[in-house]
């Protein structure tokens, strides 16, 4: 028994270390950063025409109204902890200044400039809009927040970024007299932790999506996709002609539920993973015309990339040339032996 | 597309962090997943007393709420329930101007092109609809919205209402033909109040009679 418990503990420890602490290439996270940046930029920029109308003085959602709405909820956190810098913008001009600054931060984040700093600031910008107008948010914001939060933990600016381009330029301009430090590599433990966090969270999210659907009769009866198609305010394309083809609607409905249930579990199986990732791409792309959730679909597709190995992504982005090449030495984490005193 | 190499692959580089760093990070991972698990399981329709108590563990709720993750995951990602509450909502205000004329405003405005803008106004209207019937909070949002309209258009009074629009079932579409049928089967007024303006202050006087009606052609939102 003692032997068994010792073996169990040792194997668990080794597996835990392999899963969470084996360094990996942050290329995939860099691709996800660009996609998350574009979605965040779109979401925040889409507030522009209605900024004053929602959040300005005399707007539809004064800060006091949001505070009063949240106060009756005994579980609710005090407003000061739901931080939003937009709460402190007293005049219309302050609000516009903050909005433009927020857009600038998100643009820097997307192009990867000062990425370690801009990734944290970009998360603050997105959460500020979420906390300022919680009644305006929907499916995409919690997913965007999780993706951006995990990207803050990793060197997501190592590829596809201005940072990488500047580092490469700097490295090219300095005549190299010594070889690069032995053991220097483009692998990062922080990238592994961020990737694994995203993967586990995504599995939970798919499980939640599937369970949420199973709680409604329409997903059991096979009619749910029809109710999405029939919603004129949301859809991008009119597919009401599918009323003549109930089998297609039923099959589509059940396929979504089965896929989401399968994804939550089977994505951890190496053989099933490629199939599930292709099915995920098909599912999200097909859902866009009937739900209008284009930003959400793009974000889910990007987050799914966390399950794709860096080499596959590098091959897919080979058209980007040097942007996905291993970075210059100045951006690379020094090897453990070099860091140790 | 190729699958990730299994973690047990012999070519994996060895962990580069010290044991102390790995232990500290593992502890933080445990806290993170604990909060996440509580958030996921307690945001359901009827969480158990244990889950409710677990949410009160000091860092859990602030952590989830600060990161915008304290949301009802099951409801949020169901996309549709095809149930009574799974409908489109609109907010409409009939404003009485000082010169005696009137003006009608509908949110979301039918000519909004950007889907995200339309979705925000729909969510605002849906929230007003969800809160209707809860006497503590039902008038908070409509009051702010009415005050905005009064300030923007200089209205002297009027009416504000939130309507729920029920979708057409497949049978109705098949029976009537796609070209002839209205986008909604019927609509219901969830909240209705008179807007009273005195000395620059806006107050609402709730009208209790809410009824189901067939959708009038003029107020039916256009199909995009």
Image (cartoon, coloured by chain):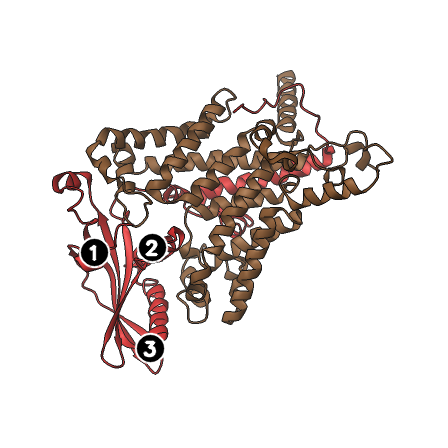
Task: Choose top left, top right, bottom left or bottom right for residue A61.
Answer: bottom left
The residue at the point 45 percent across, 43 percent down is B51
Q: Residues within 10 Å of mark 1 (few under 14, many from 20)?
A: some
Q: Is residue B16 shown left or right of residue A193?
A: right
Question: Distance of mark 3 from mark 1, alpha carbons?
Answer: 29 Å
Question: Do the residues marked 3 and 1 share a common chain?
Answer: yes
Q: Is A249 situated left or right of B12 in this image?
A: left
Look at the picture and state if A89 lies above or below A253: below
Q: Which residue is mark 3?
A: B154
Mark 2 → mark 1, Cα distance in angstroms: 15 Å
Q: Colour of chain B?
A: red
Q: Looking at this rendering, what residue extends furthest in the right direction? A: A177
Secondary element under disc 2, as helix, strand or loop, is helix
Label 2 or label 1, whichever lies nearer to me, is 2
Seen from the viewer's position, the closer of residues A337 and B219 is: B219
Query: First in sequence: mark 3 or mark 1?
Result: 3
Please tell me how crowded label 3 is: few (under 14), some (14-19), or many (20+) other residues with Cα within 10 Å. some
Q: Position of residue A56 (x, y in %)?
A: 46, 68
Nearest to the eye among marks 3 and 1: give it: 3
For label 2, the residue is B122
Please provide percent x and percent y for residue B218.
19, 60
Chain where mark 1 sits:
B
The chain coloured brown is A
- For mark 3, give the secondary structure: loop
């Amino acid at each position: 028994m003692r032997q068994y418990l010792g073996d169990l503990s040792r194997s668990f420890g080794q597996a835990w270390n392999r899963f969470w602490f084996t360094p990996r290439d942050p290329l995939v996270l860099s691709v996800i950063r660009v996609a998350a940046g574009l979605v965040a930029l779109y979401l925040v920029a889409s507030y522009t025409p209605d900024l004053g109308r929602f959040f300005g003085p005399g707007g539809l959602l004064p800060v006091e109204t949001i505070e009063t709405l949240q106060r009756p909820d005994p579980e609710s956190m005090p407003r000061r902890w739901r931080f939003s810098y937009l709460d402190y913008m007293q005049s219309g001009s302050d609000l516009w200044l903050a909005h433009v600054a927020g857009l600038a931060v998100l643009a820097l984040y997307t192009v990867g400039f000062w990425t370690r700093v801009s990734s944290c600031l970009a998360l603050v910008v997105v959460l500020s809009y979420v906390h300022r107008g919680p009644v305006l948010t929907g499916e995409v914001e919690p997913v965007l927040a999780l993706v951006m939060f995990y990207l803050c933990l990793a060197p997501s600016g190592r590829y596809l970024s201005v940072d990488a381009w500047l580092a490469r330029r700097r490295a090219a301009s300095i005549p190299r007299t010594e070889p690069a430090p032995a053991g220097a590599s483009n692998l990062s433990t922080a990238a592994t932790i961020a990737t694994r966090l995203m993967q586990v969270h995504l599995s939970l999210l798919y499980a939640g999506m599937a369970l949420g659907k199973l709680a409604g009769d329409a997903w059991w009866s096979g009619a749910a996709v029809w109710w999405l198609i029939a919603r004129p305010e949301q859809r991008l394309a009119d597919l009401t002609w599918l009323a003549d083809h109930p089998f297609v609607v039923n099959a589509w409905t059940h396929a979504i539920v089965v896929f989401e249930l399968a994804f939550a579990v089977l994505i951890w199986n190496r053989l099933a993973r490629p199939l599930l990732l292709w099915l995920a791409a098909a599912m999200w792309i097909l859902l866009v015309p009937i739900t209008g959730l284009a930003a959400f679909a793009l974000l889910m597709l990007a987050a799914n990339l966390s399950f794709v190995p860096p080499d596959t992504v590098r091959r897919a982005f080979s058209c980007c040339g040097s942007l996905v090449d291993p970075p210059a030495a100045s951006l690379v984490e020094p090897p453990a032996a070099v860091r140790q005193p | 597309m190729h699958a990730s190499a299994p973690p047990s692959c012999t070519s994996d580089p060895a962990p580069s962090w010290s044991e102390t760093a790995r232990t500290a990070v593992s502890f933080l991972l445990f806290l993170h997943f604990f909060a996440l698990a509580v958030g996921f399981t307690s945001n359901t329709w009827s969480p158990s007393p244990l889950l409710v108590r677990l949410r009160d563990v000091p860092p859990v709720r602030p952590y989830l709420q600060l990161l915008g993750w304290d949301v009802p995951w099951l409801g949020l990602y169901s996309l549709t329930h095809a149930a009574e509450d799974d409908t489109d909502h609109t907010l409409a205000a009939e404003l009485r101007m000082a010169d005696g004329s009137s003006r009608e405003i509908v949110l979301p405005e039918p000519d909004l092109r950007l889907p995200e803008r339309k979705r925000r106004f729909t969510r605002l209207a849906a929230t007003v609809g969800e809160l209707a019937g809860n006497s503590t909070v039902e008038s908070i949002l409509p009051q702010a919205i009415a005050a905005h309209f009064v300030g923007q258009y200089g209205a002297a009074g009027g009416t504000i209402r939130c309507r729920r629009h029920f979708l057409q079932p497949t049978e109705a579409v098949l029976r009537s033909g796609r070209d002839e049928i209205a986008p909604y089967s019927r609509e219901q007024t969830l909240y209705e109040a008179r807007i009273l303006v005195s000395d620059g202050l806006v107050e609402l006087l709730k009208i209790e009679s809410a009824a189901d009606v067939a959708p009038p052609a003029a107020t039916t939102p256009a199909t995009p």
